[in-house]
Structures are given as C-alpha cells and as structure tokens.
C-alpha cells in the first residue's frame, strides 16, 4: 500500500496544483462511487447498458475509486496500511465471533 501511496504522490507532485482540498476529494470520491454503482447496476443489476454508452468495467471504476482514496489519504498524511491494520485488528477482535466461520478457517488458530 505504501508503494501505491508513493506512486500517487509522485504523480501528483509533478503538478503545481497538488492535491485537491479534502472537501473536493470527498466530492470526487462520491462522483466515482456513483460511476462504480452505475457499472455494477449494468453488469449485475436490472439496468442493462445502452448501446450508445461508453464501455467501462467495474475494475476500471474501482481503480478510479482507489486513486481518489489514495489522493485523499495522502493529502491528509494518512498511512493507509496503518489504517488498514487498525481496521483488521478491530474486525478480528470485536467481530471475532459475529459470523459463522467456515470450518478450519479461523485465522487465530
């Protein structure tokens, strides 16, 4: 994850404008989420794509979301790997008995 954050930072760092403000990045993330939702609806929902609509994939839209998320984290100085580790620790402790495990799949064994 740190490599991804550094790659995005290097890309953004070549422009005078730098990162957008946190509010603008949240707006962009919301926009990208809408585009992702639209693609998911086309592929897995009841709304097929019109023949005139541009071909995009769920993978492409997830990539766009990831890019904006990394920009947001970088702009605020947040290490996403550390954030991920804290979240996984929370799920592995707080929610350790919440779901029915597949036999033999307990990661704490």
Image (cartoon, grey):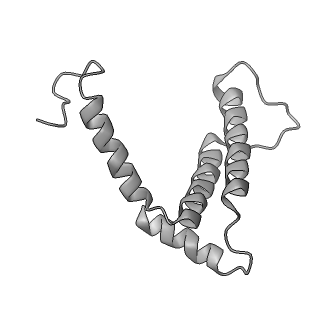
Q: Residue at x 69, y 27 (%)?
A: 41
**Outermost left residue:** 109
- Residue 109, above or below 61: above
Instruction: Determine whether, in the image, residue 89 is placed left or right of residue 6.
Output: left
Residue 91's quadrant in the figure? top left
Residue 109's quadrant in the figure? top left
Q: Residue at x 62, y 49 (%)?
A: 65
Instruction: Determine whether, in the image, residue 20 is placed left or right of residue 71.
Output: right
Q: Nearer the viewer, residue 89 or 12?
A: 89
Instruction: Determine whether, in the image, residue 49 is placed left or right of residue 10.
Output: right
Count of marks, rendered view: 0
Residue 70's quadrant in the figure? bottom right
- Residue 47, above or below 78: above
Residue 95 in percent (x, y) is at 30, 28
Q: Nearer the viewer, residue 48 or 15?
A: 15
Residue 61 in percent (x, y) is at 65, 46
**Outermost right residue:** 52
Quadrant showing the N terminus: bottom left
Instruction: Determine whether, in the image, residue 2 is placed left or right of residue 69.
Output: left
Residue 53 in percent (x, y) is at 84, 39
- Residue 102, above or below 78: above
Q: Is residue 56 visible?
A: no
Q: Residue at x 76, y 25 (%)?
A: 48
Q: Is residue 86 visible?
A: yes
Q: Nearer the viewer, residue 68 or 82?
A: 82
């Amino acid at each position: 994850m740190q490599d991804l954050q550094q790659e995005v930072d290097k890309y953004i760092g070549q422009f005078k404008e730098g990162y957008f403000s946190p509010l603008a990045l949240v707006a962009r993330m919301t926009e990208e989420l809408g585009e992702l939702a639209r693609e998911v609806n086309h592929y897995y929902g009841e709304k097929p794509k019109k023949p005139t609509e541009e071909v995009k994939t769920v993978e492409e839209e997830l990539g766009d979301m990831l890019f904006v998320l990394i920009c947001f984290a970088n702009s605020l100085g947040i290490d996403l790997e550390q954030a991920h580790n804290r979240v996984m620790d929370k799920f592995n402790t707080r929610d350790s008995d919440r779901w029915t495990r597949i036999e033999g799949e307990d990661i704490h064994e």
